[in-house]
Amino acid sequence: MSSVARKKPLVIGEKSRYVRAMFATIAPRYDQLNSLLSFHRHHAWRQQAVRLAKVGPGERCLDVCTGTGDFALALARAVGEQGTVVGADFCVPMLQIGLQKIRNRGYRQIKMAVADAQALPYPNASFDVVTVGFGVRNVASLEKALAEMVRVTRPGGRVVILEFTRPRPSPLRPLLDLYLFKILPNIGGWLSRKEAYTYLPESIAQFVSREELAAAMQRAGLTQITIYDLNFGTVCIHIGVRPAYTGEVLQ
Ligand SMILES: C[S@@+](CC[C@H](N)C(=O)[O-])C[C@H]1O[C@@H](n2cnc3c(N)ncnc32)[C@H](O)[C@@H]1O
């Protein structure tokens, strides 16, 4: 892991600028590379997250760090025409590609919005479900993003995080590390901007573990946190519930 550690960690403002500029550059090839590098599995992972969070018809969903909108599309299929989905991201070129895709497929229940996950422009408790796919690893402050995601979720609503994670120790681990830290950055680098695909394994290596992410969700006020491992433990889904206070007066 140390071989991929960045020499100088990015500070918060720098990280946001760096990440936004990087995604703006790779936006035109992002979807294609996602399919190639995940062996076409990435749609199934988002679909599974939607299923595990029991997203249903008529629900109001927010997908932060939505990028080109694939999580928003998976949510839209689950909420149907009576539901609503907002896909929010701070990188306009990513959103524009998503918007085109959504229009081409005729999903009128999805709106795409320019917003920073760390300062969401939505009222408290305005969504039933708030999701983020491969995004929290990229935000400058995980705590701020989680606090905002919880704030805009209604009591009793769910927060869903789909993210890469470091594989658990197992006989497969050396192979998985080889793919994640050596093969993937090279293929990504040949086909797109080299730096973007060395950033990917670096950011996975530096990101919190699945247990630390669950603890951060708990600190942000979520309960009933469940963790699901996918793809040989290289991808994780965390689901937490914002507690529903009943207002019952204790005697
Ligand atoms: C790896 S892409 C994930 C896109 C999409 N969610 C998916 O599942 O493919 C990460 C996205 O997070 C966005 N992002 C990173 N930090 C953000 C922030 N603070 N606020 C909003 N978007 C952010 C980037 O612009 C980028 O589009």
Image (tube, rainbow, N blue to C red):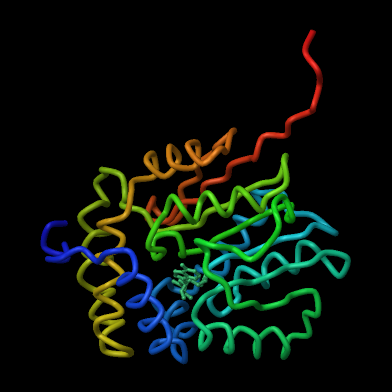
Q: Measured from the top left, where is residue 4 in percent x and y?
A: 16, 65
Left or right: residue 26 versus residue 126 is left
Does residue 78 lie above or below 54 as drawn? below
Location of residue 89 by image quarter: bottom right
Name the residue nearer the viewer: 178 or 155. Answer: 155
The correct choice, above or below, for 208 with respect to 25 in the image is above
In the rendered view, does 108 fall on the left or right side of 6? right
Q: Quadrant of residue 165?
A: bottom left
Instruction: Tell me: residue 178, above or below residue 152.
Output: below
In the displayed structure, 132 sits above or below 249; it is below
Position in image of residue 160 (x %, y %): 58, 52
Q: Position of residue 218 (x, y in %)?
A: 50, 36
Q: Is 15 positioned to the left or the right of 9 in the image?
A: right
- Judge left or right: residue 206 versus residue 50: left
Name the residue furthest right.
82
Position of the N terminus by quadrant: bottom left
Q: How many marks?
A: 0
The image quarter containing residue 169 is: top left
Residue lying at the far top of the rendered structure: 251
Q: Residue at x 80, y 57 (%)?
A: 59
At x 20%, y 63%, the residue is 9
Q: Nearer the viewer, residue 38 or 247?
A: 247
Determine the residue positioned at 67% across, 67% down.
74
Q: Quadrant of the C terminus?
A: top right
